[in-house]
Structure formats: structure tokens, C-alpha cells
Image: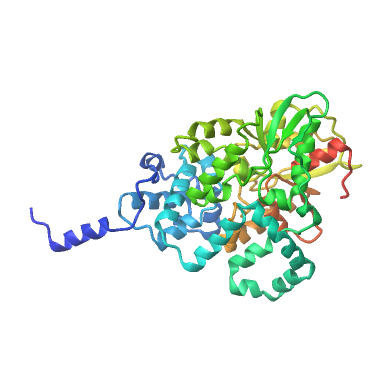
Amino acid sequence: MQVSDGAVNNVASIKNLKGFDESHPPDPKLIDSCVHCGFCLSTCPSYRVLGKEMDSPRGRIYLMDAINEGEIALNTATVEHFDSCLGCLACVSTCPSGVQYDKLISATRHQVERNYNRSLPDKLVRQLIFSLFPNPDLLRILLFPLLVYQKLGISKLLQATGLIKAISPRLAAMESILPKITLKSFQDNLPDVIPAKGEKRYRVGVILGCVQRLFFSPVNEATVRVLTANGCEVIIPKSQGCCAALPEHQGQTEQAKVLARQMIDSFADTNVDFIIINAAGCGHTLKEYGHILADDPEYAEKAKAFAAKVKDAQEFLINVGLTAKLSPLTDKPLTLVYQDACHLLHGQKISVQPRQLLRKIPGVTLREPIDAALCCGSAGVYNMLQPEVAEELGKQKVQNLLNTGAELIASANPGCTLQISKYLPDNKISVMHPMELLDYSIQGVKLEI
């Protein structure tokens, strides 16, 4: 049988399409488990905002399959659909066929970062993000100039004039969620070892996080007080760095592995029973260390053992039980709404425990928002990389929370807190971490609401 020159050229062009490399591409078996039923569409935040099939889990799985088969290329047209995914994992919770989209999108993002040449502006913004946010020591150096920047009113001036947005919408998005810098941001008051109050029940390690330790240090301090009040000796290794959540979620393979190894090493000789984390996105990644370092002969088993000890603070406290007495937070009944962080709800399957904890506080009533399982648009650094979609989701989330009529929002993830706070009307309602509320309740401190 003769083959025409045109057919030969077509075959050659298909073979020359730039695609995935051989290092853990999206697994065809996982791809084939998708029956294309479309149940994921209504729960996918990017699809709900953009309305395009290829910006849904089902659409992206089509693209992964086509790139695997050499039918289409890994190029700007396909990458933009992978980039539009928030990685919220709502589709994983919804899928009746049990499609492991989380593994598929993770593998794809690592492939994209290795095999796709981004534009120079995109590279620069991503380099800034991945050099800055996973590096708490570098962030600490920037605190003073950021404090001056805020105190002099430069931030408000630039936001009012729209100058930064005109230069770069991404930089404007980054600047707009910058939390207020206070003197507490410069403090590092937590010692290496904090003894339990009363009878010691457990010896636990606490991970401080990056953004959390600098911009939300009161949350870490509250977490430690709650743990010690409930019979836990707390160990805080000063050698700990970033948990690797941001680089791992965005396909920065080597950076994620380096940070994961460093975290494992920092807890190596602590002899802790559990490792406690109070930030949802960090917790999900810490529990995935076995996967992240699966190909590392030295750390593979260490990573599995480490991940097995990791517990979200709320998950841990419900499992072991509270021993400290709780007092009302106000002199009248208090109505709260709990904001589900995606990497707690969909990633770690933790939803009931935070609500159980909050209901233990005397006088607290919880209300549920509509679309509680829909992402707020933070999604790690998504609100900086895809600000338009994130803004729409942030506004929807805030409106749904406000519509509950609650007097206070409880949020267990710093990214969610920043995103929600950005779109809240001034002085309308506050956002607090559940650990802060428990801490106040244990101390008998009343909230001013």
C-alpha cells in the first residue's frame, strides 16, 4: 500500500507536536475513568465564570488525553485552559465515577512548567511569586518597607489612581490583598518548646507557615495556646521553612521537593506524636508528601511517615477531645458562618469537625451559606495569576456569606481570609480563624461585635 507524501507529512507533523515528557504524564487509566457525564460542570468555579467547556474538568481531561495521544500540542491555546483551573478539587468531591482529577491536574501542571515556554511577563510574575511567598525569611526583610508603604498612604493612592492596574493587573491583584502590616508582624514570640498546661496528653509539632507566620501570627499564637490548654506539649522547630504548597500546586517540581525535604528534616528528631497545621492549603500539601517524594529513594519512606502524622488543628482537636473549659464569646447569642476552605473540604475531606468545634463554644449558632462548597477565588496564588476570574468568585462568595446574616465569619485558611476580606464592605463584618475563637473562649475574652 502506497502512502501519499501529504499523509507522511501529516504523520510527521503530529509526531513533532510538542507535548508531555515521559516523567509522570497524566495517567491514561485515570483519564479513561472519566465517562464525560458533566456532573462536574456545575461545581467547577472556572466553568461557572467563563462558561467554556475547555475551562471545566471534563474539558481539561479531553485536552490531557489529546496531548497524550499526540493529537494536539502543549501550547498557549491548551495551557490557558489548564491555568484557568483553580485546583479547588470540588469536581473530585462531586464526580460519581470517582475520577481522580486532583492527580491529573497536578501531573499536568508539572508537565506545563517543564515543557511550555511562557511569555516573559508571565515568567517574571511567577518568578516573583515563587521567590517571595515560599520564603518567610525574605518576606520578613520586606516587612519594614511594606509598613512604610502603607503608613505613608502610598497604597491607597495607587489603588485610587489605578496606576498599578494599568501597568499590570496581576501586580495590582497582588497589592490589593496585602494584609495590614503591624508591629506583631515583626515579632517571633513562640519558643521552641511550650509545655502543656495540666496533665500532658500529647507531644505535637506545630508548623508556622509562610504568610501565616508573618501576616497572621496571632493565629499561630492562638493555636499554640489552644493546644497547650488541652494537654499538648508543643514543639516548634526553628529550622522549618515553607511546606511547599504554592510551588507544588503550580507545578514547580524541584522547588516543591527541596522544601518538602527541608520540612521533613526539621521535624526528624522531635519525637512528636502529631504534626499540627492550621492552614488548609498547607495541610493538604503536607499530607501529600508521600506522593511528592515518591521517586526519592532517600526520602520516600520518611515522607510517608511524616504525612501520616500531619493533622489539621481542627481535625486533631475533635479527634482527641477538648479538656479546657469554654466560655461565651459575647454577652448575647453569637451567630457565625463558617467558610469552607477548598483544601480542607475537598482536599482533606474536613468539613464536620470545624463546625463541631465552633458549636462547642457556648452561645454560638452556625448558619450555612449557599454554594458553601464553591471556591472563593483565592486558591493559593490564583487570585494573583487570574485576577478577573478570582474577583468574580470573591464577590459571589462574600455576598453569599453576608446573606446568612451572621455577625462573624470563621475562616481556616489565610488565603481565603485575605480574599474574603478584600471584598467585604468596610467595617461590615470581621473574619477570624476558628483557633482564635477557641482561644478567646478558653481565656474568657469577650469579642466586641
Left or right for 113, reference 171: left
| Numbered label tally | 0
User: Measured from the top left, where is residue 278 in percent x and y?
Assistant: 69, 41
**Residue 236 falls in image quadrant:** top right
Task: Note whether 37 is above or below 144 in the view shown.
Answer: above
Measuring 74% from the left and 50% from the top, which residue is drawn there? Answer: 216
Check the image and tell me how it is coloured.
rainbow
Return the residue nearer the eye: 19 or 398: 19
Question: Which residue: 17% across, 59% down?
Answer: 8
Which x, y percent locates residue 82?
46, 55
- Position of 104 with respect to 7 (left or right) is right
Quarter location, residue 130: bottom right
Find residue 378 and report its horizontal and vertical position in percent: 62, 54
- Residue 178 in sight here: no
Q: Which residue lies furthest to the right in this view?
A: 331
Q: Which of 210 and 386 is in front in this view?
A: 210
Residue 331 appears left or right of 86: right
Residue 154 seen in the current view = yes
Q: Residue at x 88, y 49 (%)?
A: 448
| Residue 260 % position (x, y) | 55, 42
Q: In this view, does 279 lie above or below 139?
A: above
Please tell me in which quadrant of the rendered image residue 117 appears.
Answer: bottom left
Residue nearer the viewer, 5 or 299: 299
Q: Residue at x 35, y 52 (%)?
A: 67
